[in-house]
Image (tube, rainbow, N blue to C red):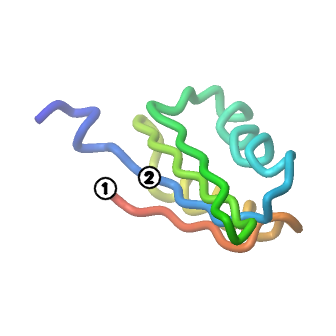
């Protein structure tokens, strides 16, 4: 198992199906000059937008702050992180 795999973290966001939701999520990583390993977004038939972002090379505390800030955003319903 590589060091990157050991430090892999996943941000999970549930948002309104708003065109700006994905941009709001990704801009948090842009501000830190971090390129995510993977980004997955899907709009469900209920109109809810699910986003998953896999990242390496950032501290858990940093991702926790990102999730907290995103949760304050009007179009974001919830944001949390975990180790996959």
Pick the residue in front: 2 or 50: 50
- What quarter of the picture does the C terminus occupy? bottom left
Circles 2 and 1: CB atoms closer than 8 Å: yes
Crowding around mark 2 (Cα neighbors within 10 Å: few <14, some 14 to 19, many 20+) is many
- What quarter of the picture does the N terminus occupy? top left
As drawn, which residue projects farthest toward the left?
Answer: 1
What residue sits 86% from the left and 46% below the top?
20
Tag 2 residue: 10
What residue sits 52% from the left and 51% below the top?
52
Residue 15's disc is none
Q: Position of residue 55 (x, y in %)?
A: 46, 39
Say whether residue 8 is visible.
Answer: yes
Tag 1 residue: 84
Q: Position of residue 70 (x, y in %)?
A: 73, 61
Q: Position of residue 38 (x, y in %)?
A: 47, 35
In the visual, does 22 lie left or right of 41? right
Q: Quadrant of residue 79?
A: bottom right
From what the image shows, is residue 12 above or below residue 6?
below
Say whether residue 67 is visible.
Answer: no
What residue sits 70% from the left and 71% below the top?
46
In the visual, does 67 lie left or right of 56? right
Q: Quadrant of residue 63?
A: bottom right
SS at circle 2: strand
Measure the C-alpha gap from mark 2 to mark 1.
6 Å
Crowding around mark 1 (Cα neighbors within 10 Å: few <14, some 14 to 19, many 20+) is few
As drawn, which residue projects farthest toward the front?
Answer: 45
Mark 2 or mark 1: which comes first in sequence? 2
Pick the residue in front: 32 or 13: 13
SS at circle 1: loop
Q: How many marks?
A: 2
What residue sits 40% from the left and 50% below the top?
9
């Amino acid at each position: 198992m590589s060091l990157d795999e050991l430090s892999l973290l996943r941000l999970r966001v549930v948002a309104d199906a708003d065109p700006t939701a994905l941009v709001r999520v990704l801009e948090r990583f842009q501000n830190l000059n971090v390129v995510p390993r993977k980004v997955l977004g899907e709009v469900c038939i209920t109109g809810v937008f699910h986003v998953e972002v896999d990242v390496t090379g950032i501290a858990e505390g940093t991702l926790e702050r990102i999730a907290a800030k995103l949760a304050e955003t009007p179009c974001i319903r919830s944001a949390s992180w975990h180790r996959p």
